[in-house]
Amino acid sequence: MKTRLITSALLLIPILAVLTSCNNKVSDSTPQYLRGGNSLLADGGNLIIAGYTSTSTRGFQATLVSFDPSVKGDTNWTHTYGGSYSDAFFCVKKSKDGYIATGFSNAANGGAPSMLVVFTDNTGKQLKALTYGGSANTQGISLVQNADSGYLVAGFIQKSGSDRDAYLVRLKNDKGDTLWTKTIGAKGDPHSAVNDAAYGVIAAPGGGYFITGALNSGYNMEGSKIFLMKISAAGKNVWAEPKVYGSGFGYSLTLTRDGGVAISGSTINGSNQDVFLVKTDTAGNLFPGWAGPISYGGSGFEYGASMIETSDGGFAVTGITETVTNGLQDVYLVRTSSLGVKTYEKNFGESDNEQGYGLIQSGTDFYITGLSNTGGSYIYLNKVDMNGGQVAGWPKLIQ
């Protein structure tokens, strides 16, 4: 029986607390200041990792790393961003002049974090930093670039301890001019929590956006529904109600080559948690050949963080597994056919915690980023082939 739910490992602070408690046995290697990668982007032969780092004198800082994945494998540059206390990035994309990343920034210990959006040039130099949400706890989890050179940033806003809403910010351009902001969420009675959040967003064909995340969950995110929502370019609901596909959380979205929409994340059934994958058409109906979400995992805890459509029309998902590991937690990689039939599942890790959050395909290989807490605390970057085989010389552990 799986007894421990991690309802959103993308929400950084709870995960960091767990890792700190597991990470007390190394005294003669890298100091265990927390580091990790949450998002991965391929650009011009280099890999751009978005995540966080920390030092003995600072809380964790929002971080971008440019890494050369050639045979030598060097870091081109590393930059940190944010305020004076705690900051992190959850997503990075290309922008007109370089990169755009989102996450959160917390200017003071004990304060509420604000959604953070940072624009940089191609060398990671900050051009503009913006925050949203005022005094409410607000975080940016995902973003997408529009055909008009604008962006939509998706996340959540929590104005009270018992009410969290999905939060959307539509940016007009790379200057950060705001077209609109929008909150989406159900309201509960004062004695019960109703939590909603947007974790994944993609542009919809013909305009507007598809959004997934957590819907109508309780205080501890229990009871959440896997959903798909469509909104217009102006932020208006296109469908009368979100489409719902069972219990769980959607973290990752992609448009498929055959005109579908794939959703992945974690599905919850009682105290069990597994990775799931489901495919719909652009109206939110189950795609032909799909009867509903397909689950992956074993008797232990599994978590699905990032999904892509592979070059052969199948899918790959990365995340966390505790079923078969080399230590406490391992990076989890699942490969499937176009109908979600599992081709293989692999785990990668050492004696402590390794977790996977970002995933891309490059040629005939996959790159995975996340964190490693074996022998220290590192941004984790791995390279595996299409069959799930470990490429020699990898993974790389970045301080």
Image: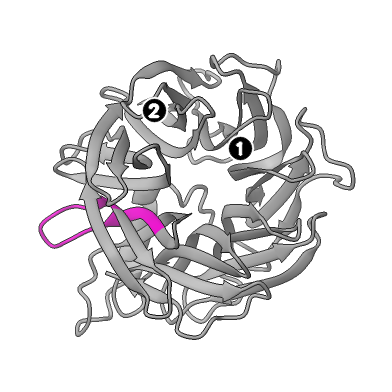
Q: Are marks 2 and 1 in contact (CB under 8 Å)?
A: no
Residues 128 and 317: in front is 128
Residue ID for mark 1: 224
Q: Position of residue 141 (x, y in %)?
A: 44, 40
Q: Amino acid at mark 1?
A: Ser
- Quick check: 315 left or right of 212? right
- Classed neighbour count for the residue bearing mark 2: other residues with Cα under 10 Å, few (<14), some (14–19), many (≥20): many
Q: Quadrant of residue 159?
A: top left
Q: Amino acid at mark 2?
A: Gln
Residue 35, placed above or below residue 214? below
User: Residues in magenta?
Assistant: 48-63
Residue ID for mark 2: 158
Q: Earlier in the sequence, mark 2 or mark 1?
A: 2
Residue 21, placed above or below residue 161? below
Does residue 100 appear in this view?
yes
Q: Position of residue 253 (x, y in %)?
A: 62, 43
